[in-house]
Image (cartoon, rainbow, N blue to C red):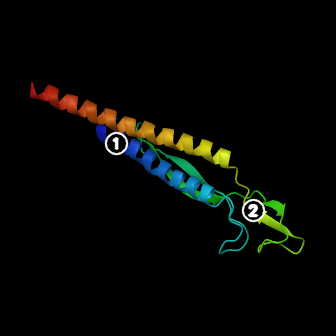
């Protein structure tokens, strides 16, 4: 694997995790959103990754799509709420903030791992250049 292949793999991982973190942030920000432009409560988003293989040793990851979670909303009885139905129930997004926080930690650690790979590759390249001077 060449130096540029290493940079490519790490950078695709960082890019994919940035998109995932953005999706998680949107989920957390909309935990109590009962009305969207499309109607109904906010639907949780999840990111789908796909491995990139361009040859035997090359690789990386890319985001193929951002899907909406199809879990049914959580119904709470709040007859005075402006978004309540005729029975007095309000549909809230089926988002578990604890699960989202765990996903956020996982995403952050993966991003950090990719930055470590980039940093290590840079250090190795610098050492190789120093050896070439001698």
| Residue drawn at 38 percent across, 35 percent down | 116
Quarter placement of the N terminus:
top left
Q: Classify the position of the C terminus by image quarter.
A: top left
Residue depth check, mark 2 versus mark 1: number of the one nearer the observer: 2
Q: Residue at x 54, y 55 (%)?
A: 64
Residue 14 drawn at (x, y percent): 43, 46
Furthest residue in direction left, as rendered: 134
Residue on which disc 2 sits = 92
* Image side of residue 88 versus residue 67, left or right: right
* The quadrant where residue 95 appears: bottom right
The residue under the point 90% across, 71% down is: 87
In this rendered view, identify the residue nearer to me: 74 or 124: 74
Circles 2 and 1, Cβ within 8 Å, touching? The answer is no
10 lies above or below 127: below
Secondary-structure class at tag 1: helix
Residue 3 lies in quadrant: top left
From the top left corner, tell me how far across and down residue 91 is, in percent.
Answer: 78, 65
Name, please, the residue furthest toward the right: 87
- Write down the residue under mark 1: 7
Dot 2 falls on a residue whose secondary structure is strand
């Amino acid at each position: 694997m060449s130096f540029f292949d290493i940079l490519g793999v790490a950078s695709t991982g960082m890019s994919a995790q940035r998109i995932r973190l953005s999706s998680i942030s949107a989920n957390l920000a909309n935990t109590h959103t009962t009305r969207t432009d499309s109607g109904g409560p906010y639907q949780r988003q999840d990111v789908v990754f796909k491995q990139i293989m361009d040859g035997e040793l090359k690789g990386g990851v890319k985001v193929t799509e951002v899907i909406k979670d199809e879990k049914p909303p959580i119904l709470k009885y709040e007859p005075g709420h402006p978004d309540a139905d005729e029975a007095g129930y309000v549909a809230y997004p089926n988002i578990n903030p604890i699960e989202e926080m765990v996903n956020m930690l996982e995403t952050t650690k993966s991003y950090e791992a990719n930055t470590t790979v980039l940093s290590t590759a840079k250090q190795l390249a610098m050492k190789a250049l120093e050896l070439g001077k001698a």
